[in-house]
Every structure is written in C-alpha cells, then in structure tokens.
Amino acid sequence: MKKQDVIMVDTLSDCLIKAVSAVNFDRLFCLTDTTTLQLCWPLISDVPVMQGAVMITIGATDKNKTIESLMHVWESLQKGGATRHSLLINLGGGMVTDLGGFAASTFKRGIKYINIPTTLLSQVDASVGGKTGINFGGLKNEIGVFNLSESVLLAPDFLRTLDDDNLLSGYAEMLKHGLLDRQEHLTELLAFDPTTVRGGDVAIEQQLVQMVGRSVAVKERIVEEDPTEHGIRKALNLGHTAGHAIESLAMEENRMVLHGYAVAWGLIMELYLSAVKCGFPSDVFHQVETYVREYYGKFHYDCKHYDRLIDFIRHDKKNVGETMNFTLLGGIGDIRINQSCSKEEIDQMLDYYREN
Ligand code: GLY
C-alpha cells in the first residue's frame, strides 16, 4: 500500500495549495455535509486552488452514511464530468471522509482523494489509515475498502468550531493511542483538559495540536505495519469491543451517545480485563478510570442488560464464531491482540463497571 502524507497544518491555505498541487488531476471536486458546508467550507472557499471546484453535499451525521448518499456522490462526480484523473477533497468528520473515501476508491475503479478532517475524532482516527466505507443492512461500516488518501490535512482551525462533547469524543481515541504507546504520552494526556481549548488560549491550543501530532503518529506506525488489519492493527480496537456494545445498546434504547464517549467507557471495561487477565498495572488502570469518570461520566445499565451487551460483543464484526476476543494490554504499550474471554469474565467486567 502507498504511503499517506499526514500534514500538520500551519497555515491552512498554504498547506491546501501544496497538497492539491502535489496531485496531477483534471477536475476538482469537494465533498461536504450540510454542516461542514456551512461551518468549514468558508475557511477554504477563497483559496485559489479551490476556485472552480465542483461542490457535492450530503446530509450530516452517521444516519446519512448510506448507499443513497454514496449514489448521490457517484452521480455528482459523473454529472460533473469526473474522469479517472479527477481529485476529490473530503471536508468533514469521519462520516464524510469514510463515505467520500469509498466513493473515490470505487468511481471509475478509483480516483485520488484528499481528507481534510474537521472534527478531533476524525483528525486522530477516521481520516488516517485508509479505512473507507458506508453503513449497510443495519450494520456500521459494513461495505468498504482499505485505500489511503493522497494526504490528510490536520488543521487546528476546525478544532475551534467544536463543542466540549465533540472535543472529548475525539480525545478518547487519543487516550487509547497514549495507552498503546508509552507512559510519558499517557501521563501528558491525563494531565490535560481538552475542553480548555475553547478558552482561546494560544498556548493551550498549541499543546493540543502537538498532542494530536503524537497521537496520529501512533496510529500511522501501527497502520504502516499492518494496513489491512490481519494482526497488530487490531491494537486500535482497544476499548472498542466493549465500547461498540455500549453504543449499540444505547442506540437500541434511543439513548444517543457519541462514539468517543462509548470508547472511553469501553476503555475502563477493557483495562479492567487487562488488569485481571494480563497483569496491567492497577495504579495506571485507576488513573485512567478516574479521568474517564470525571470527564465522560458514566453509562448506566443494570443486570437485565448483560445478555444484550454480551450478544453485541459476540457479534462484533471483529469476532469470529462464538469466541469473544478483545485487544488487551499487559502494560502501557504492551499490546495483546486476540485475547479470548469467557462469558464469566465478561460478566465480571460488566459487574465491575456497573458497581463502581
Ligand atoms: N479506527 C481503527 C482503525 O482505523 O483501524
């Protein structure tokens, strides 16, 4: 797989000009959703290379990550005269970069694309690493391909548009990357309050930007080793097997939770399993637990939900057959993929989270 250029943006217009100029293309297209068209497109619409770009807009939020939205993008590319040598810029959160990446990867067997992620979550996770796709048949990211973008532009400009919940949602993936990396990285993350970025202090914003860089570097290192997730890329699922179960239960009960919140709660559960099964140090576990409880609160459930949660864990698309596998840690950076857990162990994990 080719290498993806992840660029920490200093001046958005300069970086955009460089990134677009590095690609040979005939026509330029720009995909937004209705929210990023309003809030983010004005930040780049005056950049000279964007003049003449054909705009394509889809509905906002994950409920629009559908085959219908995808068809709209394909049709717009076709009507706009896209050829195999056209370029698509995806300006948005993970929904836009995933769907746009998939549209680009399949249109005329693949055109080039650039991601400009506009949420913290998409900057540190979705836009990097080449996973593209849509939801289908009631399942998230059911259809898709691995295909890296030409480049990813990580611009602090967009972080200023985010509310506390969206900052915290992205930060959960950064906590995960810190746990997969090393002590100093995690310590810095646990000493920082991402919501303070909204105060407008330049030094605080700079610190977050540097932490975003360190976070993405962890993901890039892992993706480079295993681009198509046959082995070590499963490390990036830390917190996600339990987190997805929480997200699915919440969705079923019409309790909306942001993805990163579910990951943060899932991290507590999976670090509990890591401590019990792999000797993860209990002091570090409790530090992370304290941080998550303070900033993310708690997801409430009771014993009658256990069967449903275990059902979701068993049918996580990363699990095969009846086994329930997790990515766990023996310590910070000591990654143990494919750790099979029994129903009793998962019951104990659910007890621990519920009772504490
Ligand atoms: N979001 C996890 C991965 O990209 O593999």
Image: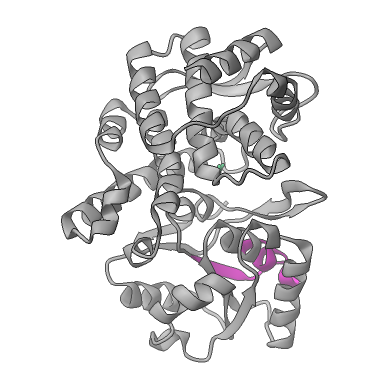
In this picture, is 57 found above or below 281? below
Residue at left offset 57%, top offset 15%: 349
Which stretch is magenta? 101-116
Query: Which of the colour schemes (rainbow, by chain, secondary structure, one colour) is used?
Result: one colour
Residue at left offset 55%, top offset 35%: 233
Q: Quadrant of residue 346?
A: top right
Q: Is residue 199 magenta?
A: no
Ligand number 1: quarter of image: top right
Residue 223, position as x, y percentages in the image: 51, 42
In this picture, is 271 found above or below 105? above
Residue 230 in sight from this viewpoint: no
Q: Residue furthest bottom?
A: 52
Residue 41, position as x, y percentages in the image: 46, 78
In this picture, is 135 found above or below 104? above
Residue at left offset 51%, top offset 56%: 127
Residue 356, position as x, y percentages in the image: 47, 17
